[in-house]
């Protein structure tokens, strides 16, 4: 199988398409991000990377907290809007109709329509080049009870999560298996 070499670039796709909420009161803002991920399980940590010229960068740098809100296919238009409009000029909450839900461990609001909102406190800011990385401790997780199944498990996939892949928003995909399915013994599978 032949491969073509390209210049170095960030080609790890798909990524979650998230809305980052930050600020408080009249300054509460939303921004779209895809540069995010898990850093550590114990203690729970994640990161977001934000361009310094973004309006939210100054807010997060000052407040040292933010909330990561996962998005769904139903939120695609609002998610895109929050990525192409600046909070300097636009009240994105009003423009998108998204609902502010008071934070529990952070002063910034969460997005009511998000199936999962992850409240974070910034631990370190790393200046990397085009983006600054905000490394953060997860201080609370707010789960929409609609996605808790009858056995008390959170069924995040049922919420219709959206991802971002090389400039495109992608809706929910096909279920292919769960962690460890490749080695699970199944009496119905013959070699």
Image: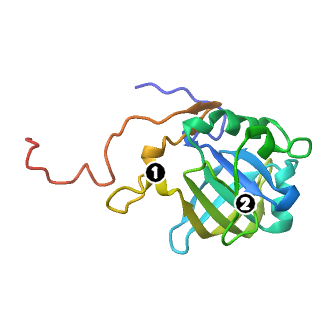
Q: Residue 77 occupies which quadrant of the picture?
A: top right
Q: Nearer the viewer, residue 23 or 32?
A: 23
Q: Decide if residue 64 is in sight here.
A: yes
Q: Identify the disc placed on residue 109.
A: 2
Percent x, y of residue 174: 38, 35
Q: Residue 17 occupies which quadrant of the picture?
A: top right
Q: How many numbered marks appear?
A: 2
Image position of 85 (left or right of 170) = right
Mark 2: which secondary structure?
Answer: loop
Q: Mark 1 sits on what residue?
A: 156
Image position of 163 (left or right of 77) = left
Mark 1: which secondary structure?
Answer: helix
Q: What residue lies at 55% left-to-right and 70% top-to-bottom?
A: 44
* Residue positioned most to the right: 89
Image position of 146 (left or right of 124) = left
**Looking at the rendering, in which quadrant would you find the C terminus?**
top left
Q: Decide if residue 13 is in sight here.
A: no
Q: What residue lies at 77% left-to-right and 51% top-to-bottom?
A: 50
**Looking at the rendering, in which quadrant would you find the N terminus?**
top left
What's the CA distance linking mark 1 and mark 2?
Answer: 21 Å
Q: Nearer the viewer, residue 128 or 26?
A: 26
Q: What residue lies at 43% left-to-right and 46% top-to-bottom?
A: 157
């Amino acid at each position: 199988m032949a491969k073509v070499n390209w210049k170095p670039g960030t080609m790890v796709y798909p990524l979650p398409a998230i809305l980052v909420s930050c600020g408080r009161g009249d300054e509460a803002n939303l921004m779209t991000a895809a540069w995010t991920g898990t850093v550590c399980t114990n203690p729970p940590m994640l990161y977001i990377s934000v361009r310094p010229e973004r309006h939210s960068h100054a807010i997060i740098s000052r407040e040292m907290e933010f909330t990561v809100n996962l998005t769904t296919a139903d939120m695609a238009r609002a998610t895109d809007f929050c990525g192409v409009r600046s909070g300097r000029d636009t009240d994105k909450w009003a423009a998108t109709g998204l609902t502010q839900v008071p934070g529990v461990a952070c002063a910034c609001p969460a997005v009511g329509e998000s199936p999962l909102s992850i409240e974070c406190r910034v631990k370190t800011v790393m200046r990397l080049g085009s983006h600054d990385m905000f490394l953060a401790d997860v201080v609370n997780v707010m789960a929409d009870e609609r996605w808790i199944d009858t056995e008390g498990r959170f069924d995040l996939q049922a919420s219709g999560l959206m991802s971002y892949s090389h400039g495109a928003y992608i809706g929910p995909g096909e279920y292919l298996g769960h962690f460890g399915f490749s080695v699970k013994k199944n009496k119905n599978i013959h070699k």
